[in-house]
Amino acid sequence: MVSSNSYFNSFYELFYTKYSTLSSIYYVLKLEGDFKVSVYREVNGENKREIISEQNFEKCQFSEPVKILPIISF
């Protein structure tokens, strides 16, 4: 499990939508084997998670990164 909801690892969607010209954001992962990757959004002060993306990957090779799309589309 990888988490980006701590203070130093936070990703502030509202900041990027307001102060940048990005059109989308995605993760590039180096995996080996079979995986199910789920990306969640947590809202500050609420005790719930919203699934943004879920993808299954089979027979991944570490030398061939996979792209998780889209994490956020603006």
Image (cartoon, rainbow, N blue to C red):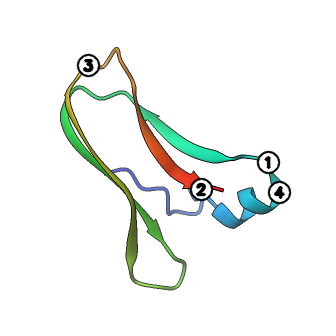
x, y (%) of residue 21?
79, 48
Binning the other alpha carbons within 10 Å of mark 3 as few (below 14), some (14 to 19) or many (20 upward) gives few
x, y (%) of residue 47?
40, 83
- Which residue is situated farthest in the top direction here? 63
Q: Earlier in the sequence, mark 2 or mark 1?
A: 2
Q: Earlier in the sequence, mark 2 or mark 3?
A: 2
Give the number of the disc on residue 61: 3
Q: Earlier in the sequence, mark 3 or mark 1?
A: 1
Q: Where 43 sits versus 55, above or below?
A: below
Relative to 54, 4 lies left or right:
right
x, y (%) of residue 44?
54, 78
Contact between labelled residues 4 and 1, with CB atoms less than 8 Å apart: no
Q: Which residue is mark 2?
A: 8
Residue ID at (38%, 80%): 48
Contact between labelled residues 4 and 2, with CB atoms less than 8 Å apart: no
Q: Which residue is mark 4?
A: 19
Quadrant of the image occupied by residue 30: top left
Q: Which residue is mark 1?
A: 21
Relative to 48, 17 lies left or right:
right
- Looking at the image, is mark 3 or mark 1 nearer the viewer? 1
Query: Which quarter of the rendered picture does the C terminus lie within?
Result: bottom right
- Which residue is situated farthest in the right direction here? 19
Binning the other alpha carbons within 10 Å of mark 1 as few (below 14), some (14 to 19) or many (20 upward) gives few
- Looking at the image, is mark 2 or mark 1 nearer the viewer? 1
Q: Give SS at disc 1.
A: loop
Residue ID at (62%, 47%): 24
Tally of marks = 4
Look at label 1 and name its amino acid: Thr
Q: Marks 2/4: CA distance?
A: 19 Å
Look at label 2 and name its amino acid: Phe
